[in-house]
Image: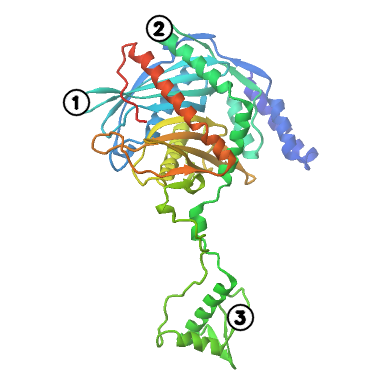
Amino acid sequence: MVPEWLKSLLSLLWNLPAILLFSVAEPKSFLEGLLEQASTDKVDVVLPKAKDVSASSFKASYVMLPEHADFFGRVFGGEVMKLIDVVAGIASKKHAGRPCVTISVDRVIFLCPVHVADILHLSVSVNRSWGSSMETGIKIIKEDAKSGKKQYACHAYMTFVARPKNAFKSFESSLRHALGLRASDSVKVQVPQVVPRSLLEHKRHLLAGRRRRQRLSQKKEWIELFQKFRKYVQSIPSLEEEDDVRTLSNEGLEQIQKQMIAHSYFKQDGEARLEGDTVIADLDEQSEPIKVPLSEITKIKSDCEARAFRRLSIPNARPTPPQSSAPKASRKILEIEETLATFVSIVRPEHCNSMSVLFGGTLMRWLEEVAFLSARNICPTSWVTAVIDSMSIRASARPGDVVKLRAIVIKVWKRSAEIYCLATTESQDDKEVFVSDAFFTLVSTNLENDQLSALDWKHVQTSNPLGQAIIDKCDQRRDERLSDRALLQKVYVSSGSHPITDPLN
């Protein structure tokens, strides 16, 4: 019996010559329709239709090495997120019986710093499922390698979506990506329901439903506002680039040219020659020769030391800032646009999973890096990630793609700061495609005792209404984080787990 995927592939190859014969004008539209024909509308049901939590749960341990940490031996939150993404993906695949991809990170709470040589014990399980998606929870216990003391270090919730287990689908997906066609959603996976047994599993099951309701209850107005804010962040020009670009006036450019001609003429290097009372120079092969009166060249010489020339001056090279604007370094309040940081990375094969899609954990590490760079605009200290909020992944990045990351500080509290991070990639028609965004809460800790540092941080403001609307929601997100911590304490401390330490922020 011929498999379905092979039938679809043979049908596709059989019809490919028709592209040249009948669809020369619109080959892309024709291919898109052909691929739609190859996909039958159906649901890929995973059996059995219900599984215990134990079917997906497992534990794994990792030793933190120097390459996972900063110069002070503190492990990057992004490196921990890489481990979380791996184990969560494995648990999701065990439950779904199909390949799975990360689509969102609801919340990651870091409860204490992790250092080099610490051992991380990760416990992971699928808490609940809905259709083709499922929430996977990850709990991390940190063990001190010297004393053996264990401490509750981190908790995370991630949402995965199962993909069809079909060899042709992988071929079709690759072909669509190569041709720049839209993705096919015709085949949905129905993953098994999660059956909780213990009291702790029932608690996780109920809380997973609560978090999903919160995600789906977001008002349409907020979603539209956030999309506009995202586009605004994408459009912010880099202030550092603007500061480095020297916008010369015509007079300044002419003065530079004259100094160069004078230097060449008196040096007698052959680039400038005298014709009558005019010095002529060919500074650029693609431009017309420049002519300067000999009297001006002589005047330039008289303004310099005998046969020696100062460094070329650049009059009016940089616009003078308004008198009312103080230097950025001396101000206590910055515009959020002034905290912009950018970061670019190329997706390599080692950054991707078995489906040649960028790992969510790697993307989180890159977002964390650009968040650190942005936070240094308000205080040049060593930052630590405390919380990752509302991370969504809307598009996939593949090997060879260039991922562009941006971050701005949107709120500064007494002991923490919230940074909005954004990742995009370029499509085949050179358009920016939104990949992911997230809110990072960063804190600065004392290097000796890991306690919070009370530093003289700058604060931020904005005159942009979109930015102000997002800033107004920061306190609400902070209250939700504190509420989640309280829930974690009730759920896990009452279940005999390791106590939660004082929160970082």
Q: Are marks 3 and 1 in contact (CB under 8 Å)?
A: no
Q: CA distance from mark 2 to mark 1?
A: 32 Å
Colour option used = rainbow
At horizontal 69% and vertical 30% (from top left) the residue drawn is 35
Q: Secondary structure at mark 1?
A: loop
- Mark toward the start of the polypeptide (2 vs 3): 2
Q: Secondary structure at mark 2?
A: helix
At horizontal 52% and vertical 57% (from top left) the residue drawn is 242
Q: Residue furthest left?
A: 147
Q: Which mark is residue 289?
A: 3
Where does label 1 land, which residue? 147
User: In the rendered image, which quarter is residue 293 located in?
Assistant: bottom right
Please determine whether, in this image, residue 222 is positioned above or below residue 135: below
Task: Judge left or right: residue 247 versus residue 504.
Answer: right
Quarter of the image that includes the C terminus: top left
- Give 282 or 40, whichever is nearer the viewer: 282
Task: Judge left or right: residue 235 versus residue 15.
Answer: left
At which x and y percent is residue 309? Answer: 42, 81
Three-letter code for the amino acid on which mark 2 is drawn: Leu
User: In the rendered image, which quarter is residue 247 located in?
Assistant: bottom right
At which x and y percent is residue 13? Answer: 69, 32
Q: Residue furthest front?
A: 324
- Give 204 or 197, whichever is nearer the viewer: 204
